Every structure is written in structure tokens, then in C-alpha cells.
Amino acid sequence: MEKLPELNYQSFLADAMRDYLDYLDHLGFSIVGPAYNLRRIDRFLAENHVGCTQQRDSRLWLRLVAQYQGRVKANTLRGWRQTFHGLCRYLVRQGWMLENPVTAFTVPKPQHYRPYVFSTDELRRFFDLLQQQAANSSDPITSYGFRSRYVFYHLIYACGLRVSEAIRLTTADYSAEQRTLFIQPSKFLKDRLIPIGQRVASNLEQLLDLRRIVQTSCKMLRVS
């Protein structure tokens, strides 16, 4: 779970930002994202010496886009705009502003994600490279690192796992007897038990054996 940042805002809207987050919190909305967005907007207002709501020239707000365009994703800019638009609507309702200046605060259209589909030959060469790196390693620790990468990516490929699911896997989630993996709750907060093939099970067993060798070596080094 993402941690709520410190609400140590410094601009002239600092108190209003904290009041707005408290308002959202009482309505039951998550305030983590808005709190981070307001921190960036607060810094922008302070750096541009905006000291009152009368300084609402839309060109000033558009400078935020110009300042960060190309440095952050379009979706990030859209999130900043959405948060600041909500804050200004809140200020208008409270009578602190006469109108919402963010209506002219345009942002670039988001770029649609275009996934790259690897061919069978590309995947084979990728996995062969990882295996060669592990085989050519001169010590168990380095070999374990390369071997872990191979097993990790092959596990995602062979079992159709999300990256977040593979990262959260522990040795307790693997059953050698039943040849299954327990996937902890992820999307839609559901867990599942999936069967794995002989190749995946063999990879996991080899990795666990290498891990025991590395742990033994580390213990011997500490003793000596």
C-alpha cells in the first residue's frame, strides 16, 4: 500500500490543500494520489511566486505542462490536472475563488501503450543467453543471480504470471510434491493454485539447490 506523504505544503494554498484532502477523506476517497499530486502543484506555485487566487492567468498554469512535458508521462500530467481541478472546484464552492482557472489547463493526449510481442526465436535466444550467463559464472553467488533471472522470466512466460505475482512468490508457495504454485491475491483480490510443468518444476528445484549451496558458502565464509 502506498504511503501517504507528509502534508508539509509551502504555497499560499497549503492550508486549503490540507482542508481539501480532509474533505476527500471524509467522503471516503483515497487521498494518497491527490496528496502526491498536490505536493508537485504546491512546489510549482511556490517556485513561481504565486501568492493569491487573483493570479489566475491560465498561461501560468500552462507553464506547468511546458515545464514537465517530455519529462513525465502524459497520464501523470492528466492526474495533476484532475487533482488541481478538483481543488479549485472546492475553493469555488467555499467562496475562496470566483471561478476555476484550470478549465483552460490543457494537457497532451495520453500515448496508448503498444506492447511488443516477442517471437519464438527471440524468446529462445533470450533464455539461452540467461542460461549461458549462469553457466559461465565463476562463483556460486554470481551464478545464482543469473540463474534467478532465468527462472523468473521463464516462470512468467510458462505460467502466464503477472510481474507483481512472480515477485511476491516465496518458497512456501511452491509445492514440489503436488507440482503447483500458490499465487497470492492480486488482481480482483483473488488467489489461485496453478499446476506447473516439468520444465518449470525442474528450474525451481535447480534454483533451490543452488540457493542452498550459496547459503552454505556464506556461512562458511562468516565462520572463517
Image (cartoon, rainbow, N blue to C red):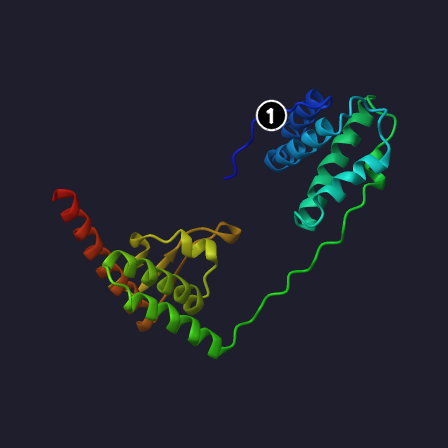
Query: Which residue is most to the front?
Result: 138
How far across and how far down the image is residue 103, in percent?
84, 39
Q: How many marks?
A: 1
Residue at (17%, 52%) from the top-left corner?
A: 217
How far across and how far down the image is residue 41, in percent?
70, 33
Q: Nearer the viewer, residue 49 or 178?
A: 49
Query: Which residue is most to the left?
Result: 224
In the displayed structure, 181 sits above or below 48; it is: below
In the displayed structure, 109 sits above or below 137; it is: above
Q: Nearer the viewer, residue 190 or 116?
A: 116
Question: SS of the residue at dot 1?
Answer: loop
Rendered-image quadrant of the C terminus: top left
Name the residue tied to disc 1.
7
Give the side of residue 215 with respect to residue 133, left or right: left
In the displayed structure, 74 sits above or below 200; it is: above
Residue at (67%, 45%) from the top-left corner?
A: 76
Residue type, numbered disc 1: Leu
Instruction: Name which quarter of the figure residue 104 lies in.
Output: top right
In the displayed structure, 78 sits above or below 137; it is: above
Q: Residues within 10 Å of mark 1 (few under 14, many from 20)?
A: some
How far across and how far down the image is residue 130, in percent?
37, 67
Give the side of residue 222 with respect to residue 189, left or right: left
Q: Nearer the viewer, residue 144 or 83?
A: 144
Give the side of residue 8 with respect to residue 1, left or right: right
Instruction: Name which quarter of the figure residue 90 lies in.
Output: top right
Instruction: Name which quarter of the figure residue 169 lies in.
Output: bottom left
How far across and how far down the image is residue 154, in percent?
40, 67
